[in-house]
Amino acid sequence: MSEETPARNPTLYILSAPSGGGKSSLARALVDRTEDIVTSVSHTTRPQRMGETNGVDYFFVDATEFEQMVKDDGFLEHARVFDHCYGTSRKAVEQAIAQDCSVVLDIDWQGARQVRRAFPAAVSVYILPPSVEILFQRLVDRGRDTPEEITARLSEAASEMDHFAEYDHILINTNFDAALAELEALVCRGEPPLSGQDFNVGALVDCAKNVRLKTSETANL
């Protein structure tokens, strides 16, 4: 565990990134190394993958159960991503904060918008790769997606990353340990990430848009 003192008051942290950006791994490592902070385990309708544990990686539910939770206002945020639904339990977040624990949400930009409306004091961080090429390689290296799925995720990354300006902080995940250290500094000492301050995010987004355009042109041939 880290010896650093976490934020005095319980805080809701939002981490977002394009697929392959590293937000889930960083969120888990941050919680492992920092006291009085927990992750909120999302509910999802997507199939459980090999090696995943229900209640740890996600709460895996069917579409009927998910829709019932929506009707019961059981989600702080929820969204459909790549044909599957994801949602953050309102009760779980409120209970953690009531117990003086900060909470890290690993969610996309759509969910982040909903959370900021409910919790205006939430601190949001958008995690970006240093280049589209590196993002592509990370998607390949994690070995979870088919070539078609990787192409779809790269195409979607352009529209996802275009929402970076809605976040309080930008963090460039060039090196995992360095990115984790920046998150720890933010949570423990309130220090904003430095890696994104002089980074040309607009150029990265434009590059991703070009990849999406080329992908679309290829698909139409």
Image (cartoon, helix red, strand yellow):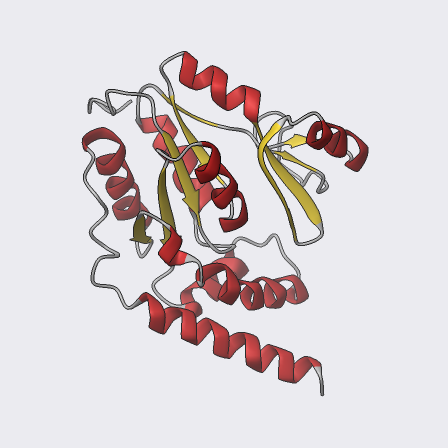
Confirm whether residue 61 shows in the render.
Answer: no
209 left or right of 169 in image: right
186 left or right of 115 in image: left
Residue 140 percent coordinates (x, y): 54, 61
Q: Specify the quadrant of the image occupied by residue 38.
A: top left
Residue occupying the point 28% across, 68% down: 200
136 left or right of 12 in image: right
Confirm whether residue 181 shows in the render.
Answer: yes
Residue located farthest toward the top when viewing the structure as drawn: 99
Residues 146 and 196: in front is 196
Residue located farthest toward the right when viewing the structure as drawn: 64
Residues 64 and 32: in front is 64
Residue occupying the point 43% across, 69% down: 132
Residue occupying the point 47% across, 71% down: 208
Specify the quadrant that holds the N terminus: top left
Residue 96 percent coordinates (x, y): 45, 17
Residue 67 percent coordinates (x, y): 75, 34
Residues 67 and 197: in front is 67
Residue 84 percent coordinates (x, y): 70, 47
Specify the quadrant that holds the C terminus: bottom right
Residue occupying the point 66% across, 54% down: 82
79 left or right of 141 in image: right
In the image, is residue 162 above or below residue 89?
Answer: below
Q: Specify the quadrant of the image occupied by residue 64.
A: top right
